[in-house]
Image (cartoon, helix red, strand yellow):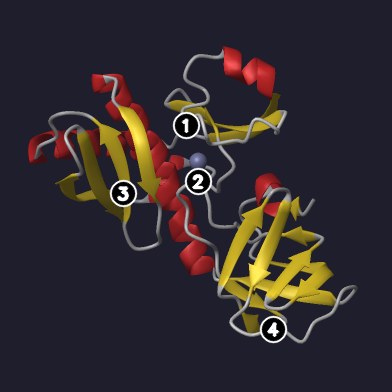
C-alpha cells in the first residue's frame, strides 16, 4: 500500500520517496503526496525527478504515477517529487466548497448529490432536485460564502466502517468506499458537514476565499447541475 502523505498533511508541496516499481509509463512509490484522480477530483500534477506527470491514478491500495513516456527510473531509486501546488491548492479550495454547498442544499430541500467534478478552474455538483433557478443558486452560494467567512475548521479522522455506517448521512455516496475497506476516513467541516471522504481539503474555510455560482444546467428530469468557482 502506498503511504498517503496527503491524508496526514494536505499541505505537503514536495517530498522524497523511493520507487517501489516501474512498469512502462507507470511508477509506484512507497509514499506520495500526489492525490490521485477519484471521488470526483481531478488528478494532481507535478514532477518526479524533474519529469512531468501526465496523471496520478489509484487501483486498489496502490497509487500509480503516470508519465507520457517511460521515466528512466528503476525500483529502489530515491526520488524528489514536486507538486503543481497552484493547481492542487485550487482543488482543495474547490473540493471543500463542494462539501459546504452539498450540505446546504441537502439541508434546504433534502436533495441527494448524484455526482460532482472538482477541477482547478471550475467545478460542479449534481443534485437530484426538480427546480433550481438562478435565484435559488445565488441564495445557496450566499450561504456558502457565510460559512467561508465564518472561518470553520476542517478536520479529518479515521473510523471503523461498521460504526460509520450507523451514523445517518455520514456515507453519502454509497459507492464512495469499496466494501472491502474496513476503516473509513471521515472529514468534518465544523457543524456544517461530516462525511466519509478520501480527498484533499483546506484546514479552514477562510482559505476558500470567495465562491461564485457560474451557471446551472438541467441534466435529465430531476437532475440539476450547478457550476461554481473560487477566487
Ligand atoms: Zn471531501
Dot label at residue 70: 4
Q: Measuring 9% from the left and 37% from the top, which residue is drawn there?
A: 133
> Is any part of residue 107 visible from this angle?
yes
In the depicted structure, whether residue 109 falls above or below residue 50: above
Q: In the figure, 187 relative to 45: above or below?
A: above
| Residue 173 numbered tag | 1
- Residue at (71%, 30%) from the top-left corner? 183
Q: Which residue is mark 3?
A: 124
State the SS at label 3.
strand
Q: Are marks 4 and 2 in contact (CB under 8 Å)?
A: no
Nearest the camera: 188 or 66? 66
Whether tag 3 and tag 1 are in contact, CB under 8 A, the answer is no
The span from disc 4 to disc 3 (Cα, nearest Å) is 34 Å
Judge the density around disc 3: few (<14), some (14-19), many (≥20) Cα neighbours within 10 Å.
many
Asked if disc 2 is less than 8 Å from ligand 1, the answer is: yes
Q: Nearer the viewer, residue 29 or 108?
A: 29
- Residue identifier under label 2: 39
Amino acid at each position: 500500500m502506498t503511504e498517503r502523505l496527503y491524508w496526514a498533511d494536505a499541505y505537503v508541496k514536495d517530498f522524497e520517496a523511493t520507487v517501489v516499481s516501474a512498469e512502462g509509463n507507470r511508477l509506484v512509490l512507497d509514499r506520495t503526496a500526489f492525490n490521485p484522480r477519484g471521488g470526483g477530483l481531478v488528478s494532481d500534477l507535478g514532477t518526479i525527478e524533474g519529469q512531468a506527470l501526465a496523471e496520478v491514478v489509484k487501483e486498489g491500495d496502490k497509487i500509480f504515477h503516470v508519465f507520457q513516456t517511460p521515466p528512466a527510473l528503476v525500483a529502489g531509486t530515491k526520488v524528489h517529487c514536486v507538486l503543481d501546488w497552484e493547481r492542487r491548492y485550487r482543488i482543495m479550495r474547490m473540493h471543500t466548497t463542494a462539501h459546504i454547498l452539498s450540505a446546504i442544499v441537502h439541508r434546504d430541500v433534502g436533495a441527494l448529490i448524484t455526482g460532482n467534478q472538482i477541477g482547478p478552474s471550475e467545478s460542479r455538483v449534481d443534485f437530484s432536485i426538480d427546480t433550481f433557478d438562478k435565484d435559488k443558486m445565488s441564495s445557496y452560494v450566499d450561504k456558502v460564502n457565510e460559512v467561508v467567512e465564518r472561518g470553520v475548521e476542517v478536520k479529518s479522522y479515521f473510523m471503523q466502517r461498521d460504526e460509520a455506517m450507523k451514523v445517518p448521512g455520514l456515507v453519502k455516496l454509497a459507492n464512495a468506499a469499496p466494501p472491502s475497506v474496513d476503516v473509513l476516513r471521515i472529514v468534518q467541516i465544523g457543524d456544517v458537514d461530516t462525511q466519509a471522504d478520501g480527498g484533499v481539503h483546506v484546514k479552514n474555510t477562510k482559505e476558500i476565499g470567495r465562491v461564485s455560482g457560474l451557471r446551472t444546467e438541467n441534466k435529465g428530469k430531476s437532475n440539476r447541475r450547478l457550476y461554481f468557482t473560487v477566487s
